[in-house]
Structures are given as C-alpha cells and as structure tokens.
Amino acid sequence: MTGDITDRAVVAKRVDDGDPETAEIRELVRAAGYEVAGEVTQTRTADPALQLGEGKVAEVAALVEQTDADRVVFDNRLGPYQTFNLGQELPDGTEVVDRFRLILDIFGQRAHTRKAQLQVELAELRYELPRAEAKTSLAKRDERPGFMGLGEYDESREQDIKAQISRIRDELEKIEKTEAQRRETRRESGFDLVALAGYTNAGKSTLLRRLAEDVDVDENEDRHPDLDTIAESQDRLFTTLGTTTRRMELERRNVLLTDTVGFISDLPHWLVESFKSTLESVYQADLVLLVVDASEPLDDIREKLATSHDTLYERNEAPIVTVFNKVDRVADDELAEKMEALAALAPNPVAVSGLEGINLGELRERIDDELPARERERLVLPMTEDTMSVVSWVHDHAYVRDVDYGDEQVVIDFEARPTIVERSHAKASELVAEA
C-alpha cells in the first residue's frame, strides 16, 4: 500500500440490525492515507460466502468501476474464503481489506521503534496464519489462489509463519524484561510512574504535551533512554503507536508520564495479544489516567469506559482516575449530565481540556493526591568529605522541605518513596562509618 492521496477506497459495512455507522471506518481509511470514494452498507445477517448479499456485492463492484477505486475496505471481519470469493466478484486488481488488515496497515506506517515494528510484524503474521492455512486447503482442491487478499500459494509458508511468530515473541520478551528493569530503576531513583490510557483520539498526546510542556527532557536522555521529546497531538487515529515518556514535575514529586497506544473497539484477540506488551507500562504504573473524549455521545463514552476497565482490571493494580478531556467542546450542562450518568464507571472524575489548558491545575493536584503516599524523614548526616554528595542525592530523589547546615552535621527534612527513605538510611550509615 502506497498511501498516496490518489489512492481511493470504497467502504463497505454490514450489520445484523439497525443503521450501519461508518464514521469510524471512514476515519480509519483516511488515517491509512486513502480517499473515501464511496460506501455501500447493508442491514442483514452475514452471507457466509460474501459477507454482503450478492446484490450488494454487485453494487460494490459497480461503485469500484465508477470511482476507479484501488481497494474495498470492509468494516467487518472477513474470513479467508470470504476474501477469496469477494476477489472473484470485484474488478481485476481490486484489493479486498477488512477492518483489521486496515488497522495493521496504519500500525505499520506509525511503527518507528523496534518494539512497535516487532508488534506490527507479529500481528500481521497472526492475521496471515489462517489465510495461509486456507491457501493450503484451496490448493489441495486445485484452486490455486492468486488473488488480492490471500496472495500466491506457498506450501512452506504456514510453517515459516509459525517459526517467525516464535522468534518475534522471544525478542519482545527480551525487550519487555529490559523495560521492566528500567521502570524499577526509575522507582529506585525516586520517580512516580503515571500512565495515560484510553481510546485512540481521546487526546492523550495533547494532554501529555500540556502536562510536560515546560520540561526539557534532553537532560534525562542518558538516564532514561526511551524518553521521547515528541508525542504527536493531531486530530486523527493512531498518532501514538509506541509509548512516549516525558518528565512531569510536581511540587513535591518527580513524575514520569507515559502516553500509550490507544484502545480501539472490536479488536480481535490476536491483535490485542500482539500489542499486549505495550500495555505493560500501564499495568506497571503507580497511577493510571483513563482519558475519555467528553464530546462523544453518552452511550459511546459508556461503552469505551466499560471496555477500558475490562482491559485495565485484567492486571492493573494501580488506582485509576478518569479524565474527561475536550470539555471545551461540551456545554456545561451536557458535561454535568454525562458525568452524573457515568458516575458508576467514573467516580470523582477530573474534567479538563488538554487543547485549551482548562483545569490542568486540578488534574495535577489529583495526580499528587492519588500517587502512593510519601514518608517524611529527618536525616542526620555527619560532616565528611562525601556529605554534600549525599545531600545532593536526596535533593535529586526526594522532596526536600528543609536543610539545616551545622558545623559538625547536616539535618535534612524530606519526603520520599519508602525505598528512597531506606536507601537514604544506608547512605547515612556509610557516612557515619566513614566519620
């Protein structure tokens, strides 16, 4: 897929009942770099062979001819045989893509880190595996499948895919171990870890830039090699595929804030599994900010909150604070009604606008309140050649309330994570031994 602006796609969608909604799939098509040339929708039970009824498939074929489209994108999950059958009914050279293949195309365009690239490759292989199995079945029936969607038959491809999946899993596991060690090092350095979670396009990246906008992260580059100065904030889907971590300074804390890949509705198990390691930064955080778009319809917000909680509660142990973002797009009375209706899913939320900078002070206070409690400690250090380096270390790892310099000792009054307090005692003991 080239993604050139001249590329055109016809959107197709079938639903069992009700009116088909195509706003999201149109946005996904545009995010992939295609122009939406038209759409065909249908309300009926799925046709086992074609997904749509035969008459609607003929209508799709005519629209492809009329608009000179390059591909047909289904906002449905297509089985391998449905993809094959559709390919026979459409004009030659028309690519048949379902919702999940389209998402993989977008992910592939946005994957800039080694981890993200591996996760995209893993998802693509898991998508291709049942299609390779289908090609084997078709080949045994002498139906050599050379068509858009399944590709040419290769007898060894199925085993190759399985071997590649195993290799990628091993490499991702090594990356995750390295990242887990890095997170633990940050905690030992006195950092609280806060993760932004939520559906794609909820405004997480904009919020990250607002909360960390005054901080130059270059100074931390060697200390935290995955820190990224750029987290895109654009009104489109999937601008963030990998994680972006930036330093956010609160008055009494050192905080690292991580923006993560956005959730999206109706993802198959194989796709969720492929990107599961991305969520480790959420599962291992001290606090999760669950960001929702307050301007969306109430039912959409409710569904997304419920799905997000299902995903987070699987392994997450940190407190969750719901952040209603984009309040600049919502009238006050409408916002109040939504927050009241969603109180069971989002108790005591914070309403902000990342774009306009509304209520960010309140959000910072809430972050400070919800993060793990700090211990207050009064440390007495003897005056030695290394005392000032310990004082400097405490300043770097804790919130120092007061320092009293005497002739023979230094007394530091500070607040810190329990692990930092414990390490400060060890450093003080070393100074006593030295003295």
Image (cartoon, rainbow, N blue to C red):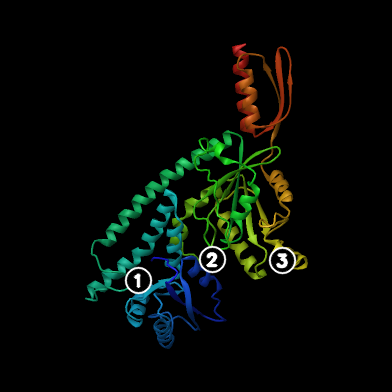
| Residue at (46% x, 73% y) in the render | 76
Pointer 2 residue: 265
| Residue at (72% x, 44% y) in the render | 369
Element at badge 2? loop
Quadrant in the picture for residue 412 = top right
Using residue 216 as the reference point, say whether residue 413 is left or right of it: right
- Residue in the foreground of this view, choosing between 225 and 435: 225
Pointer 3 residue: 330
- Residue in the foreground of this view, choosing between 254 and 77: 254
Sequence-wise, the earlier of marks 3 and 1 is 1
- What is the three-letter code of the residue carrying label 1? Gly
Q: Nearer the viewer, mark 3 or mark 1?
A: 3
Pointer 1 residue: 149
Which residue is most to the front? 6
On screen, residue 178 above or below 91:
above
- What is the three-letter code of the residue carrying label 3? Val
